[in-house]
Amino acid sequence: MNNVKCECGHANPVGTVLCEACGNPLLEEIKQGDSPLDMRYEGAARRSQTYNKSIIDKVWNFFSSVKIAVYMIVIVLVASIVGTIFPQEVYIPVPKPASIFYEETYGFIGKIYYLLGFHNLFSSWWYVLLLLMIGISLVVCSLDRMIPLYKALKKQKVKHSINFLTRQRLKAEVSVPAEWGSKLDQLQGFLKKRRYDVRREGDSLLAEKGRFSRWGPYINHIGLIIFLIGALMRLVPGYYLDQYVWVKDGETKKVPETPYYVKSEGFTIDFYEKEDLPEGAGLDNLQGVIKQYQTKAVLYENVNAGLPGSEPKLQEVARHDIIVNHPLKYNDLQLFQSGQRPKAIAALNMTLVNEKTGDKIGKFKIDLYNPQSEYKINDTTTIKMLEYYPDFEFTKDKKPTTKSPNPDNPAFVLNVISPQTPNGEKAWLFLGSYLPAPGTENIFGYEFSMPDLTNITGLMVRKDKSLPVIYFGCFISMLGLVMGFYWQHRRIWIQTERSLVYVAGHTNKNWFGLKNEVLDVFKKASIPVSLVEHGKDGKKVD
Amino acid sequence: MGRKLIELSSNLLLVAFILYIVASFVFAISVTGKRWGKRDEQAHKQRFGSIGFGITIVAVLAHASYIITRWIGQGHIPTSNMFEFIAFLAFSIAVAFVIIYLVYRVPILGAFAIPVVFIMIAYASVFPRTVTPLIPALQSYWLKIHVTTAAAGEGIFAVGFAAGLMYLVRTIDQSKNSRSRRWLEGTLTLVLMLVGFIITSVVFNAMDYKAEFELNIDNTKSVVEYKMPAIAGPQNAVLLSDSAMKPWFDAPGWMKGLNAAKKLNTVIWSVLSGLGLYVLLRLLFRKRLGQLLQPALSDLDPEMIDEISYRAIAIGYPVFTLGALIFAMIWAAEAWGRFWGWDPKEVWALITWLFYTAYLHLRLSKGWIGEKSAWLAVLGFIVVMVTLVFVNLVIVGLHSYAQVG
């Protein structure tokens, strides 16, 4: 590879804009001009600006382009806006299939929305792909810029070409003052007091501070990458668990996909009362304002979980009153207060009666969560449960089925076997009513008493091993942002050439602050200086 | 005790509101008044700048006292409903202004940034002020941490917005009819529409205006209560109130939901009153708004105001990232068992963040400075406001606890 030789004699790698040694521009047309130099990345050679031959170069250059990164960001941004126009499928307020819901609720626009896949935007392949591409872009952009920048800043020398100094945005030329040697010592002292690192070479110096802030953006990008990796880790089996369990008061239930069991020792809903708020705080009606949902939960571990076929042997491992914002945590398992069914029907209290005589034959109780297959009413009469649909509905071809395992709309087929009905007498039983088999003269009927009520708590079961990674990524990201935005990399060059002193300053942000600092330091050393501020567009502003 | 403290807090907010208005005028006079009589321009600017800043400090203290007294009075931090949040956002804008002012000492910045503060307080007062007990999801110390940090970030962005707007007013050539000039008038009119919304709400509220409509939704009869005269009424609705104005037209059929037509009506009132204010100002001064404001900024260095706008956004960006995204994720993981759920409010926080991310990359790597950068700073705060207004009031999600019409 041919190197590019600067006037000063230094051989620069191909693609270098400003000489690594003296800062002089290498391209003739930049060298001749008098506009401020573009100091981005110190004019170092960047891979993306240098090579464009192989496929790898082209891919690299695509992802290293900030323009393309901004395009991707803007596409994600606009898509996200569209994604919030109507609710996402997971937030549909009514239990209807998405294919019907959007058209029915929002009309033609809703239909288009659904057909274009915006109802599931955030897990759609192209949205996720864009996020991944932004992730790749983060890595490539950072490598493409950070490594050359790091090298250039490490290699920088105290003295520069005059062309470099006079073409900084902030600059001044002063004729060498009397006793310049001791004045320069003074300047050096004042700069050091302002926490500059000062390097001196004879009558020239380079004062620099806050170089670390230049790494801020890259550290932020590393943090974002760690965050994205954390988000992807959730796809690894065993890293992420998302389950749900409904538990009745007093019931012990298996926590799905884990060796644990959870018992609810009682679910309660607290309402706000007058004493909870300061008197006369402006609220007249506190009725029904919920203060807290709480489940007294006990977590058990099944010690026999590893032994196939053995009975579960439960051992208490944790106990916690779960409220919103305060989940039960055990190892990496978390149980969140999430749903509630207060005063839900737990069991039906039934009486079998003789329809003809009105005689009560006997009582029985159907536990909706754990129905028996047979109920013995007396020595001669038993009821067999033939079918149980906890959440009854008809399928499209009019067959009975259950919508969910939750007993929201229980229905049964019962068969009474007695001396009068040795072959059984079948009937459908619903909440509060029953229906004998068609065409039969039924003998038996059913009476409903007050059912047993219970509170049911809905616990969200979560395991998220990626969380520490995600938080770590956030932390690194914040570190980078704070470094990059709350500190600035400032440099002041003072160089003596025969009878002239050249002063130049550069900062990556906050020119206002740098200008005041230079003026202040020179004022303290009582050297009159008139700073020239090259405008950003190349025009001169005093 | 509680009631007295809350009454006191309301009065303190009123004091702050009035002081902010006074401070804005003083800041404006610091520049526009310097040619009055035979004044020493520099001394005049400095003197009125200091007075304006002093009044601002007193206003911020009163505003802080409002927060503290209401906090003690109701027993939880006043950031839990729309009124409280917007009043808090106004506070963080004021604090951000104080910080930026201490760095750059540009008095005229106060004439643009402080009006954002009092407009916000006025906007807050449109919402019900009643104390709301915390729903279970909000009972967490993260309410203090997340909401305050997010508001602080947005407050600093607001100062970036004010400075960006100043840049545009300062630099856009008013003698030539250009796209920039038209957009600037449009942006200023948008601000007037917000003012119009506040004025109409306050006026009709003071008049205790009510118009009830009965309508059929999914075969059940419901009643909607309009608090502004109905220009757009709900479709197929019956007006129940006798004295109320009859709607001029019905809301289009695709706007469903109980309150859709009412919200449309509010938007119509805001737009009409904003346009009305615009016409009034044009007739009064016989100048475009940009033209009217430009002289006040004539001796301001455009590069300085460009830097202030960028600096504000550079300071605000990490704060916003921390408050609106990271703290939000940690809280969401604690409360709902997932750190991110694509809830509309979460998505809009991401949209805002992406927007400012694009701003920073365009500025730092693509050299978008000056006018382009200023437009982005202005648009960025409009995105923040959209999140605040549109998402909270229109899109329903886990976060939308504010019940307002």
Image (tube, helix red, strand yellow):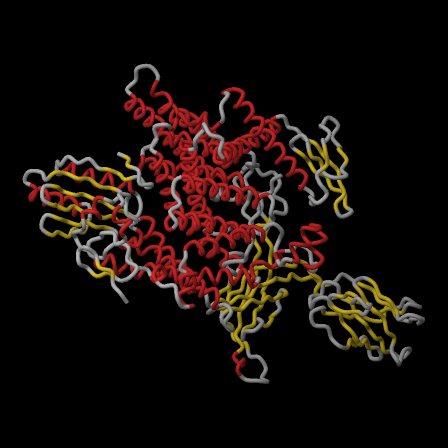
Who's the residue at 78% across and 67% down the image? Answer: A395
Give the left or right position of residue A236, taking residue B371 as reference: right
Closest to the observer: B219 or A336?
A: B219
Q: Number of numbered discs present?
A: 0
Residue B93 placement: quadrant: top left
Outermost residue, top side? B37
Outermost residue, left side? A179
Measuring from the top left, give residue A462's x and y in whole percent.
53, 66
Q: Quadrant of the C terminus of chain B?
A: top right
Who's the residue at 26% across and 62% down the image? Answer: A13
Residue A520 placement: quadrant: top left
Q: Is residue A353 above or below residue B132?
A: below
Closest to the observer: A334 or A46?
A: A46
Q: Is residue A349 above or below residue A502?
A: below
Give the left or right position of residue A487, taking residue B142 as reference: left
Give the left or right position of residue A178, taking residue B100 as reference: left
Measuring from the top left, give residue B185's x and y in whole percent.
50, 32
Measuring from the top left, give residue A56's x and y in whole percent.
41, 68
Who's the residue at 68% across and 59% down the image? Answer: A98
Tell me, yes or no, if residue B1 can be seen here. no
Closest to the observer: A460 or B56?
A: B56
Q: Is residue A36 above or below residue B346?
A: above
Who's the residue at 91% across and 71% down the image? Answer: A443
Closest to the observer: B277 or A498?
A: A498
Measuring from the top left, give residue A375's x and y in whole percent.
78, 75
Tell me, yes or no, if residue A153 can be seen here. yes
